């Protein structure tokens, strides 16, 4: 009897040990599964160009994202009366569609936005500022300084440069008889474009001071310097682009990969930064720069995708800049920049050949258009 009791006691101990082992094994399996999910590595093609990716996104989606200008070529907040060239930044949405669809009317719309912008250029290469009266009367308004104006011009120049490089690499634009008049008209603007690049180069210190802790703005600056530098064959501008890009890439979280804003990740600003980093990735010729961008794009994009809810909404939980009741810009509360996050998802999905990421972009696009 005593022998039987001893055997039962030993069996109970063994079962307890096995049970503990199974619990630990299950937990480790879950952790391993979660780590595998978090550490999924997407392969980024090094051969895909910007125009290649536009073709993969497709005319229909590009058209949905294109902004039609007013008859005078104004876009954004300039449509209610000229404010600043900064608000012409959506001109690239028009050239994207024009290049992909080979649509002459869209190309004419694009040129109207460029011409409108340079109609407001100052002698130093910057642009006029005409602050709306309602903003001037607002108690929250503070007058802009030289750094603000330089930053606004960099926003404009990043869009202009991206469009010009895309057009330069389009056989339809560079060789078609139907595009010849607009080619000539853009070429005639090259002295004005060079003047803007000179203005941005002379404003380097202002931009470094203004944008030091804002990775997305540093990437706007880098894109402006790089694209206009390549378009105009200016090595000094390309060198500056690398300097600004390096400062932006240095501001990513070492563990989770997001671009840092006020010490944390921000689901709006991070989406913008990844979109800009991907555009640089498509455009840069130098393999060392491409590899450096790739190293930061993958973790930042993984983090961005983790911030997207099942219904396609981009969560602002944990943001310290863009959230309900968060920061304002020129009298308006900042909202999540859905358009740039959507573009980043499409870029990334097609670049990596991931249907899952493209579908996620579709889901976010559908949510943004319903709300």
Image: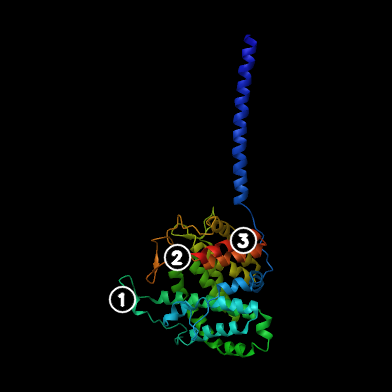
* Residue shown at the point (61%, 27%) measured from the top left: 17
Question: Is residue 130 shown to the viewer in this render?
Answer: yes
Circle 3/circle 2 CB separation < 8 Å? no
Residue 110, percent from left and from top: 56, 82
Q: Could you say which is closer to the camera, residue 173 or residue 262?
A: 173
Query: What secondary structure is found at the residue carrying circle 3?
Result: helix
Give the mark nearer the N terminus: 1 vs 2.
1
SS label for mark 2:
loop
Choose mark 3 or mark 2, whichever is in front: 3
Residue 235 in view: no
Q: Nearer the viewer, mark 3 or mark 1?
A: 3
The disc, 3 or 2, on the residue closer to the chain's N-terminal end is 2
Using the image, tell me which numbered label, if any, was put on residue 335.
2
Q: Which mark is residue 258?
A: none
Could you tell me residue 226's position as x and y percent? 57, 75
Quadrant, the N terminus? top right
The residue tagged 3 is 359
Give the residue number, with chain letter if any, for mark 1: 137
Q: Earlier in the sequence, mark 3 or mark 1?
A: 1
Crowding near pointer 1: few (<14 within 10 Å), some, many (20+)?
A: few
- Colour basis: rainbow
Badge 2 local density, few (<14 within 10 Å), some, or many (20+)?
some
């Amino acid at each position: 009897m005593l022998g039987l009791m001893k055997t039962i006691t030993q069996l109970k101990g063994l079962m307890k040990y096995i049970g503990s082992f199974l619990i630990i094994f299950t937990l480790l399996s879950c952790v391993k599964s979660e780590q595998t999910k978090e550490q999924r590595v997407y392969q980024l093609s090094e051969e895909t160009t910007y125009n290649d990716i536009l073709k993969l996104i497709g005319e229909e989606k590009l058209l949905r994202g294109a902004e039609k200008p007013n008859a005078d070529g104004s876009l954004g907040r300039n449509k209610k009366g000229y404010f600043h060239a900064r608000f012409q930044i959506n001109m690239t949405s028009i050239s994207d569609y024009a290049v992909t669809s080979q649509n002459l009317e869209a190309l004419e719309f694009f040129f109207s936005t460029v011409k409108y912008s340079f109609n407001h250029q100052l002698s130093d290469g910057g642009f006029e500022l005409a602050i709306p009266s309602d903003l001037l009367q607002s108690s929250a308004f503070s007058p802009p300084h030289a750094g603000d104006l330089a930053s606004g011009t960099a926003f404009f120049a990043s869009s202009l440069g991206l469009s010009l490089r895309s057009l330069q690499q389009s056989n339809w634009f560079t060789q078609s008889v139907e595009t010849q008049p607009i080619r000539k008209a853009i070429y005639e603007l090259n002295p004005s474009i060079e003047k803007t690049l000179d203005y941005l180069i002379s404003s380097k210190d202002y931009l470094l001071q203004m944008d030091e802790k804002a990775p997305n703005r540093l990437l706007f600056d880098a894109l402006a310097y790089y694209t206009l530098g390549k378009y105009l064959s200016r090595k000094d501008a390309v060198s500056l682009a690398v300097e600004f890009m390096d400062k932006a890439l240095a501001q990513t979280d070492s563990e989770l990969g997001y671009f840092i804003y006020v010490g944390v990740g921000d689901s709006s600003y991070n989406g913008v930064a990844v979109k800009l980093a991907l555009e640089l990735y498509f455009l840069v010729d130098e393999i060392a720069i491409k590899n450096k961008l790739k190293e930061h794009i993958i973790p930042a994009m993984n983090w961005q995708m983790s911030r997207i809810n099942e219904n396609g909404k981009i969560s602002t939980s944990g943001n310290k800049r863009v959230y309900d009741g968060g920061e304002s810009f020129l009298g308006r509360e900042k909202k999540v920049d859905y358009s740039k996050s959507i573009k980043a998802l499409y870029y990334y999905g097609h670049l990596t050949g991931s249907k899952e990421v493209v579908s996620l972009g579709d889901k976010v696009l559908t949510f943004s258009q319903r709300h």
